[in-house]
Image (cartoon, rainbow, N blue to C red):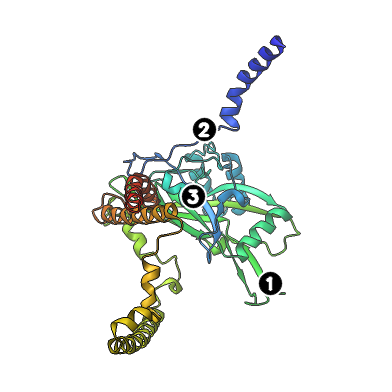
């Protein structure tokens, strides 16, 4: 038995490197620090996060739950794709190939590998992963092939269902978010859905527009090009799709790095229907006021009649007769049936109130960054843990007061 156990232990130790490097305990990637001052041609990482229906932002899935590219095409594949789209001798074809040969495609970035995340990002449900996009600082890319993939019935069905559910994707460059739609559909009935003559289109090309100020990334946007869309209406027919991207860099001198999040306050990615409905709020407020007024009038009449009746009674009959609202004193001063649960509930309520006021104070004094993703949720969890002593003190004090 001893030699067998010794051999098993040796095999386990020998398999640990394989497990840690590419298996169960795979090392996560570090995030690219926001605010880094880049030199020319420095690598810029595009981090993909999640996809989900636009009408229900809380329902999210991994970006790579859809069959997107997780590996970059090499330089030979890129040149071959350029030659297919623009035959040699056509106007601009030679310039395109020369530009492609000058900018070497490394194809060394692998997608679908997890990123390290903060506590607040994990609570918010983020799923940050690497992407194969190759961006370099201040290097414009007119067009570059990401990958060329033949999508079968299974992959096309996933994309088509996502498009019909208005799925959007979310990406990051140095903690700056950007959103876009996966595809679009045309000539469909709002009730019956897909009909004869309707089409479903996939957007395989992404255009990144990155703004810089003093060698720092201050703004990012991503757009899709309808001119490069691919018809995937028929999911039973295998379709070859060229996923590609382009990059445009510009100087955004008006936006400083500290104010980079101010652009998102005016973002129009969310539809106008998400704006405040003042008419509904005013209507609800007026209804509450009217109901409160009616209840107050009814209670005042009941109390007035009871007071007038009690004033006419002598002391003996007053002690004998107790009815109506006067019986409340028996419920108010009754000892609770479960004193431990009652004291714990009061302490927890006080703890939540104190943690909320602490959180509001820290946010108003800018000690907590309200623009940093997940910082509010992380601060709330930490403050709730720190204020547990206050809740326990209130619960214990009330328990001893009740003997």
Mark positioned earlier in the residue sequence (3 or 2): 2
Residue name at image x 40 percent, y 81 percent: 324
Residue name at image x 29 percent, y 53 percent: 358
Mark positioned earlier in the residue sequence (1 or 3): 3
> Given contact means CB atoms under 8 Å apart, are the residues at marks 1 and 3 in contact?
no
Residue situated in front as seen by the camera: 2 or 403: 403
x and y percent of residue 49 in the render? 50, 50
> Given contact means CB atoms under 8 Å apart, are the residues at marks 2 and 1 in contact?
no
Quarter of the figure with the N terminus: top right
Q: Residues within 10 Å of mark 1 (few under 14, many from 20)?
A: some
On screen, 291 above or below 83? below
**Residue occupied by mark 1:** 194
Q: Farthest residue to the right: give it.
A: 236
**Residue occupied by mark 2:** 27
* Label 3: which secondary element: loop
- Disc on res. 126: 3
Numbered disc in front, either 2 or 1: 2
């Amino acid at each position: 038995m001893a030699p067998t156990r010794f051999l098993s232990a040796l095999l386990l130790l020998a398999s640990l490197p394989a497990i840690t490097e590419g298996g169960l305990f795979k090392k996560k990637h570090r995030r690219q620090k926001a605010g880094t001052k880049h030199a020319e041609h420095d690598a810029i990482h595009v981090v993909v996060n999640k996809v989900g229906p636009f009408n229900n932002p809380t329902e999210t899935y991994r970006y790579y739950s859809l069959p997107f590219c997780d590996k970059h095409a090499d330089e030979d594949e890129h040149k071959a794709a350029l030659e297919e789209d623009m035959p040699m001798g056509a106007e601009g074809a030679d310039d395109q190939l020369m530009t492609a040969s000058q900018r070497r495609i490394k194809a060394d970035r692998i997608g679908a590998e997890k990123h390290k995340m903060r506590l607040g990002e994990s609570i918010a449900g983020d799923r940050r992963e690497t992407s194969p996009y190759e961006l370099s600082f201040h290097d414009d890319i007119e067009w570059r092939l990401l990958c060329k993939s033949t999508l079968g019935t299974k992959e096309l069905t996933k994309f088509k269902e996502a498009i019909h559910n208005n799925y959007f994707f979310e990406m990051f460059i140095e903690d700056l978010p950007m959103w876009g739609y996966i595809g679009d559909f045309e000539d469909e009935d709002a009730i019956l859905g897909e009909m004869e003559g309707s089409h479903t289109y996939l957007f395989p090309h992404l255009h990144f527009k990155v703004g810089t100020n003093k060698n720092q990334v201050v703004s990012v946007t991503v757009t899709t090009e309808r001119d490069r869309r691919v018809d995937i209406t028929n999911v039973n027919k295998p379709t070859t799709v060229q996923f590609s991207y382009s990059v445009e860099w510009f100087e955004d001198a008006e936006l400083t790095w500290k104010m980079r999040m101010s652009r998102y306050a005016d973002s129009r990615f969310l539809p106008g229907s998400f704006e405040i409905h003042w008419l509904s709020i005013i209507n609800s407020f007026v209804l509450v006021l009217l109901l409160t007024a009616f209840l107050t009038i009814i209670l005042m009449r009941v109390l007035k009649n009871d007071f007038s009746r009690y004033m006419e009674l002598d002391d003996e009959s007053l002690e004998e007769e107790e009815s109506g609202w006067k019986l409340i004193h028996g419920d108010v001063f009754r000892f609770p049936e479960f004193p431990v649960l009652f004291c714990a509930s009061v302490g927890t309520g006080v703890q939540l109130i104190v943690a909320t006021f602490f959180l509001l104070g820290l946010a108003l004094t800018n000690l907590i960054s309200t623009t940093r993703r997940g910082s509010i949720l992380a601060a709330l969890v930490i403050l709730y843990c720190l204020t547990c002593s206050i809740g326990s003190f209130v619960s214990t004090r009330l328990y001893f007061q009740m003997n």
